[in-house]
Image (cartoon, rainbow, N blue to C red):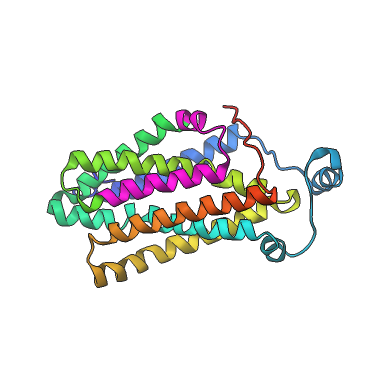
Amino acid sequence: AGFLFKNHIQWIFWGDALTAFVAFILILWFVPETKPDEKAILEKAANPASGEKGETGNTLVVFFRRPFLVTFSLFIAICGFIYNQHGYTLSLQLNDLFLGDGAKIYGYIMSCNAITVLLLTTLLTYLTRKNTPIINVSIAVVFYAIGFGALYFVQSIFFFLITTIIWTVGEILVFINYQVYVAEHTPITHRTRFNGVLQMIMGISMLASPLLSGYLSKWFGLNNIWIIVFFLALLVSLGLIIQYQIEKKTGSIKKAVPVKN
């Protein structure tokens, strides 16, 4: 998109539509339906040997009965605000630094982000497989703090790419772990609905991020947002570690299950 932005902007949208259509065809032809019917869910929930516990009741009521899940969701929402700075503050910073070439440089950075995800996801999954999901998310937010916080000082393309690799490591660790945590703290009867609630919370965070960032840049200056993000990320990481310790004391932590690729 960064490469096409200057002279062929219409192809960004044509390309977006084309890839969405290709994805639709691939899913339709090759991805089987795995959703169990209601009877199968209730039978599994009623069977103590299955290790799955079901509940009845309103989704939000059941959700708020789980304070650990509620606080984790709030931490994830803040993570969403931090992560979304790559699409708002970073793009504005590049435009200020590189003037007419800002979109092209942003294209390099997002390509670096995509390549890092492709190359490191399997490796990071393997290296962190013995950690609990909440600890992995806590580690991820430290990478956010370093990768985004360093942007306060960066002015060359090379170091922009280095910081991109760092915060992308955080992105990978968040996205391969947060839904695992949700699944572990969710009754089988509400698992999909709870994921929907978390997606809604993430969506609100994404909605608020540009607006809040705009006010912060107006009050403190665009570059100073990275300092705010740095300390906010450290606070989130600390909060997750404290929650982990509390869960450990109360016996709410489950042992990490190795991921089979």
Res. 260 image quadrant: top right
Q: Residue at x 47, y 38 (%)?
A: 22
Residue 73 covered by magenta stretch:
no
Q: Magenta region: which residues?
A: 122-150
| Residue 39 x %, y % | 84, 47
Q: Residue at x 49, y 60 (%)?
A: 203
Q: Is residue 201 visible?
A: yes
| Residue 88 x %, y % | 31, 58
- In the rendered structure, the answer to whether residue 46 lies left or right of residue 115 reads right
Q: Residue at x 30, y 38 (%)?
A: 111
Q: Is residue 108 visible?
A: no
Which corner quadrant holds the N terminus? top left
Tell me: residue 75, above or below residue 46: below
Q: How many marks?
A: 0
- In the rendered structure, the answer to whether residue 67 lies left or right of residue 148 reads right
| Residue 27 x %, y % | 56, 37
Which corner quadrant holds the C terminus? top right
Predominant SS of the magenta segment: helix
Task: Identify which residue, 238 or 128, lies in the foreground.
Answer: 238
